[in-house]
Image (cartoon, helix red, strand yellow):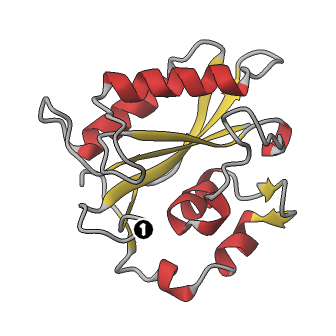
Amino acid sequence: MILIAVGANLSAHDGRTSYQVCTEAVDALARLPGIRLVAMSPWYRSAPVPRSDQPDYLNGVARLAPTGSIEPDPATLLAMLQEIEQANGRERSVPNAARTLDLDIIAMGEGGQIVREQPDPVLPHPRAHLRAFVLLPVQDVAPDWVHPGLGCIVRDLISGLPAGQLHRSAISLVGEQP
């Protein structure tokens, strides 16, 4: 199982909306060699973290699986994700800057259980368990996922978040076409 967070809060330079960029990125994920798309969560809207005057983000999680018996190397997969980001106008400036596309590996391995401290990417994603905008869509596509470092199932991670992160004003389900 491979869990990829998909997010954006800026339109692309060619005028495509965040929704269009994110859905096209999911199509690109499905075309990666040796990988198939198993499920895609609904889209969620969330405030930037940390809070800022940036536009809200569109967030979702794609669940992928290898087409063969071997998953791609995490570093190789990260490089492929960064190519998709770059093709969609991602500019890396300062941490937490607004972006046209953000693709993060949340978890990998049998049941999403790879633990990897270094080199990049760190697995599971080091802040995934703290972010409702990641955990809610993970629950949609992998409700039985257990965080390998914490030993907690995703629903328990969600219930352990501060209540403020779960208010509908901060995170709300986005319709078919935001």
Percent from the top left, x then y, of residue 50? 42, 68
Say whether residue 148 is left or right of residue 44.
right
Percent from the top left, x then y, of residue 135? 60, 62
State which quadrant residue 83 falls in: top left
Percent from the top left, x then y, of residue 78? 59, 28
Going by the numbered disc 1, the residue's amino acid type is: Pro
Q: Residue furthest front?
A: 94
Looking at this view, is 164 or 35 the one in front? 164
Q: Residue furthest left?
A: 15
Residue 34 to residue 55: above or below: above
Looking at this view, is 98 or 110 the one in front? 98
* Residue where numbered disc 1 is placed: 50
Residue 78 to residue 116: above or below: above
Q: Quadrant of the C terminus?
A: bottom left
Residue 53 to residue 159: above or below: above
Q: Quadrant of the N terminus?
A: top right
In what element is the residue under mark 1?
Answer: loop
Task: Residue at 27% x, 29% y: name it.
Answer: 89
Task: Residue at 35% x, 30% y: name it.
Answer: 24
Percent from the top left, x then y, of residue 74? 70, 27
Looking at this view, is 78 or 92 the one in front? 92
